[in-house]
Image (spheres, helix red, strand yellow):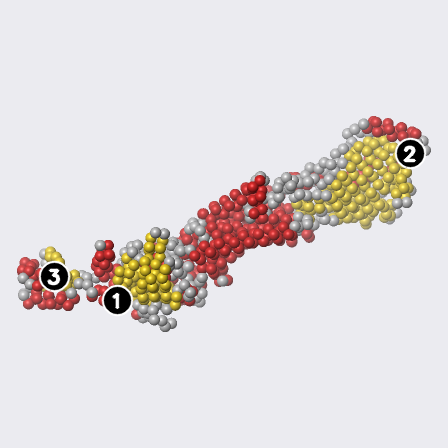
């Protein structure tokens, strides 16, 4: 199936001889991305999900090239793994094929649409679509289909922090088709029939993450990202 | 508190399923009485006492205490009533004085510890005031039962078998206490007992009931005088005595004779006449023993009832 | 009346059996807490396994609130037994001791005596629940600290740190109301017999049978379930819903309160008319 999709896109792009080179776009994205060696930022997280209610939370997010990410919080916070690891993961993995699809006009902004297909059959991602703002070399939006976690999309807004164009807000939307649910421990005498009280798995939702107070290229040591073992 | 009658019971009845425990009972107790409430076992004494103390509700009849209907004035009346009902039981895990303190508080009485100690002293338990009641003997619990009946200085004291479990000295002390309370403190005592000589010694009025019904009621002295006495004469010369008796009007009064002891059924005023007869005929009388008591009276009456 | 209640409480706390409940809670809950200290990660992982593959967690979800919530849910059968030990003895114990005679010949109405005993039983029930709350939350806080609370019911709900304590206050309050119902039932049975074992067994039997009936989701039993008081006793869990179904909670609370009053009323009726032969 994957080979068919690949051939199809190659065929389409070969016809469209005037299409951009997606690899160049990705290379430019990566170059821009690598300008920031490390950063620390405050994040506010708000969750809007069926079958999960959580309060708005605050945390600190730390990043160091190429893909070290750490979340720290005094209180509880819940951050989507795919959301925070997406961009680092994008550039770390080289075994993919990129295909330029088209140019989209999004809120007056011209965005190049690229499809990324992993070549590794064991990859959990089936296909990713990126909307790239080539004027700033940033990904404005991504849609990813996975084998195990359904599909998710990430909308990103940017703002200048020092001289760097950083993510200021991220909207992470997902449609999960598989989640193992926790059983309710709390019903010795359920007031409703048990079949009605069967835990329904969260399937859809959106996580809003606001980034602020960036501290960029301050030299975070590698040891900082070592996992604290309990 | 001035009242005409301390207890007035009219047509009192109580049924337990098919058993008529108390049947149309009537009695009156007057201020200052030591009232003996007598009857054989199962006569209905305890049932009557429980109705006096509102532990049991009567099926018929009325009870007045201090001239007031009991049902409508229960709390006012019971403030001036102290009682032991059958075996006195207490909170075994509490001390003697603590039991009394709690009972006093429940009664709403503002009784000092000093007063409680004085009451314990009256019943001879002052040295064990701080001992847990579960360590008490039966007799000690009985004394404590009397103490709890006295702590709030009642006008009427109802005692149901108060000397049960006591040694002879203890019984004597209780008898003296009853007389003290009656004569010196002006208390009215309602005394239920089957130890009949106890009642005889202390009571001035009495009732005998049987099968829940009054057999007889009245002054102890009147009830005693209404029956013939059994008088034993001890005579030194039995043969001469026999001949003298047979030759006289006294032969019809002779109940039995054994050696020197000759028992006659006499009226009280005949005792001295018979004694004079023996002496005038040269017969030495070594003893004259009147044997009629309330006990014999009680047994006679209840036997008649059985017949 | 205050004086009478004080006397009844004094008598209750002078008996060794009263302390069984407090000792049981004082020992059992720390045992649960220590066990959770060593094994709690597994429990939390079980609760969050539906999310852990997709989400990164931070913060202290494994805290005193989680443990207190767990303790409250598992002790729903055990606490009633501790309640019946005392409440079932309030009247039957007097009969066993033979102290009815000295008690009921006092110049105080049976209504006041019964009411004082009933209130003393309710106070004991509330003290036991308060002890449960103190040990669960108080000692739990010292061991595990505070944090957010994760509750898995029909959905996963995570409560903010400052949004939890008032819920526990209301939950413990509701649990106390449930335990007052148990106390009332045991008290009623206590008025019928002269041995405190009877009320203990009767009360626990009623509760267990009702719980079993409630759990049989077939036809008649399912229809009957909402009318059984045990179906309403567990609504303390509603305080850990978002939003809280206030109507349901208030209705069930009113049903529990009505049961309490009913059992008290029946006891009063029986006892004020009862002949004391013992």
The reply to whether label 1 and label 2 mark residues of one chain is no
Tell which tag, 3 or 2, sits nearer the viewer. 3
Can you say whether A171 is above or below C187 in the image? above
Task: Tell whether B300 sits left or right of B24.
Answer: left
Towards the viewer: A116 or B64: B64
Dot 1 and dot 2 residues touching (CB under 8 Å)? no
Towards the viewer: C147 or B276: B276
Residue A188 screen position, x and y as percent: 58, 43
Query: Residue at the spot x=58%, y=48% of the render?
Result: C232
Res B186 seen here: yes
Instruction: Give me the chain letter of mark 1.
Output: B
The reply to whether label 1 and label 3 mark residues of one chain is yes
Tell which tag, 1 or 2, sits nearer the viewer. 1
User: How far apart are the alpha carbons under marks 1 and 3?
Assistant: 27 Å
Instruction: Give me the chain letter of mark 3.
Output: B
Task: Tell whether A84 sits left or right of B277.
Answer: right
- Residue annotated with mark 3: B253
Q: What's the mark number on residue A190?
A: none
User: How far apart are the alpha carbons under marks 1 and 2?
Assistant: 133 Å
Dot 1 and dot 3 residues touching (CB under 8 Å)? no
Towards the viewer: C218 or A218: C218
Q: Quadrant of the C terminus of chain C?
A: bottom left
Residue A66, located in which quarter of the rendered image? Answer: top right
Res B85 seen here: no
- Residue annotated with mark 2: A21
Task: Tell whether B259 sits left or right of B22.
Answer: left
Residue C23 screen position, x and y as percent: 52, 49
Label 1: state its secondary structure.
strand
Residue C103, located in which quarter of the rendered image? Answer: bottom left
Residue B296 screen position, x and y as percent: 21, 59
Towards the viewer: C117 or B129: C117
- Residue annotated with mark 1: B219
């Amino acid at each position: 199936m994957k080979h068919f999709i690949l051939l199809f896109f190659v065929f389409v792009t070969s016809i469209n001889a005037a299409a951009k080179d997606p690899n160049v776009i990705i290379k430019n994205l990566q170059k821009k991305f690598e300008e920031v060696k490390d950063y620390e930022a405050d994040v506010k997280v708000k969750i809007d999900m069926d079958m999960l209610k959580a309060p708005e939370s605050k945390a600190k997010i730390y990043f160091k090239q190429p893909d070290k990410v750490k979340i720290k919080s005094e209180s509880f916070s819940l951050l989507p793994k795919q959301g925070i690891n997406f961009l680092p993961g994008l550039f770390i993995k080289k075994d993919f094929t990129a295909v330029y699809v088209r140019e989209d006009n999004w809120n007056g902004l011209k965005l190049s649409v690229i499809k990324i297909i992993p070549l590794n059959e064991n990859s959990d991602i089936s296909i990713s679509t990126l909307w790239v703002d080539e004027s700033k070399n940033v990904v404005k939006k991504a849609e990813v289909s996975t084998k195990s976690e359904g599909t998710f999309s990430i909308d990103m807004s940017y703002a200048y922090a020092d001289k760097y164009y950083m993510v200021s807000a991220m909207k992470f939307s997902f449609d999960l088709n598989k989640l193992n649910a926790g059983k309710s421990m709390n019903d010795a005498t359920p007031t409703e029939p048990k079949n009605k009280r069967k835990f329904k798995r969260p399937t859809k939702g959106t996580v809003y993450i606001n980034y602020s107070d960036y501290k960029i290229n301050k030299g975070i040591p590698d040891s900082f990202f070592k996992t604290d073992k309990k | 508190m001035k009242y005409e009658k301390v207890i007035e019971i009219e047509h009192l009845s109580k049924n337990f399923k098919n058993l008529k425990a108390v049947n149309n009972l009537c009695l009156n107790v007057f201020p200052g009485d030591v009232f003996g409430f007598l009857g054989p076992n199962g006569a209905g004494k305890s049932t009557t006492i429980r109705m006096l103390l509102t532990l049991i509700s009567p099926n018929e009849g009325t009870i007045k205490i201090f001239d007031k209907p009991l049902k409508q004035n229960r709390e006012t009346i019971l403030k001036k009533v102290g009682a032991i009902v059958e075996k006195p039981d207490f909170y075994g895990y509490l001390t003697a004085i603590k039991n009394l303190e709690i009972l006093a508080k429940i009664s709403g009485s503002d009784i000092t510890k000093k007063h409680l100690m004085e009451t314990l002293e009256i019943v001879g338990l002052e040295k064990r005031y701080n001992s847990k009641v579960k360590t008490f003997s039966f007799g000690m619990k009985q004394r404590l039962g009397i103490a709890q009946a006295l702590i709030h200085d009642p006008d009427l004291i109802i005692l149901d078998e108060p000397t049960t479990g006591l040694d002879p000295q203890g019984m004597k002390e209780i008898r003296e206490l009853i007389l003290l309370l009656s004569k010196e403190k002006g208390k009215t005592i309602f005394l239920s007992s089957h130890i009949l000589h106890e009642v005889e010694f202390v009571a001035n009025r009495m009732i005998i009931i049987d099968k829940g019904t009054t057999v007889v009621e009245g002054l102890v002295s009147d009830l005693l005088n209404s029956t013939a006495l059994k008088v034993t004469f001890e005579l030194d010369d039995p043969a001469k005595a026999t001949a003298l008796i047979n030759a006289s009007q006294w032969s019809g009064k002779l109940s039995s004779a054994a050696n020197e002891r000759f028992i006659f059924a006499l009226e009280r005023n005949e005792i001295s006449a018979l004694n004079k007869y023996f002496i005038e005929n040269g017969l030495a009388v070594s003893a004259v023993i009147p044997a009629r008591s309330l006990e014999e009276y009680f047994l006679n009456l209840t036997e008649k009832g059985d017949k | 009346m205050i004086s009478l209640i004080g006397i009844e409480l004094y008598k209750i706390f002078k008996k060794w059996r009263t302390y069984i409940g407090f000792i049981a809670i004082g020992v059992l809950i720390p045992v649960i807490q220590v066990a959770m200290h060593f094994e709690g990660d597994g429990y939390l992982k079980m609760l969050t396994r539906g999310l852990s593959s997709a989400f990164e967690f931070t913060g202290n979800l494994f805290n005193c609130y989680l443990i207190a919530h767990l303790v409250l849910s598992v002790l729903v059968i055990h606490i009633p037994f501790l309640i019946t030990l005392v409440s079932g003895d309030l009247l039957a114990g007097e009969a066993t001791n033979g102290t009815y005679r000295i008690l009921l010949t006092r110049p105080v109405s049976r209504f006041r005596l019964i009411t004082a005993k009933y209130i003393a039983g309710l106070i004991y029930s509330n003290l036991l629940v308060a002890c449960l709350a103190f040990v669960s939350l108080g000692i739990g806080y010292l061991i595990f600290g505070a944090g957010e609370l994760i509750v898995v019911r029909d959905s996963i709900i995570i409560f903010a740190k400052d949004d939890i304590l008032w819920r526990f206050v209301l939950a413990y309050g509701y649990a106390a109301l449930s335990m007052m119902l148990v106390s009332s039932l045991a008290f009623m049975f206590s008025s019928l017999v002269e041995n405190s074992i009877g009320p203990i067994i009767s009360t626990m039997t009623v509760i267990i049978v009702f719980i079993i009936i409630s759990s049989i989701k077939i036809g008649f039993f399912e229809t009957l379930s909402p009318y059984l008081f045990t179906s309403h006793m567990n609504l303390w869990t509603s305080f850990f819903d978002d939003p809280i179904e206030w109507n349901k909670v208030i209705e069930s609370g009113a049903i529990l309160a009505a049961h309490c009053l009913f059992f008290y009323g029946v006891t009063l009726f029986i006892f004020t008319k009862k002949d004391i032969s013992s």
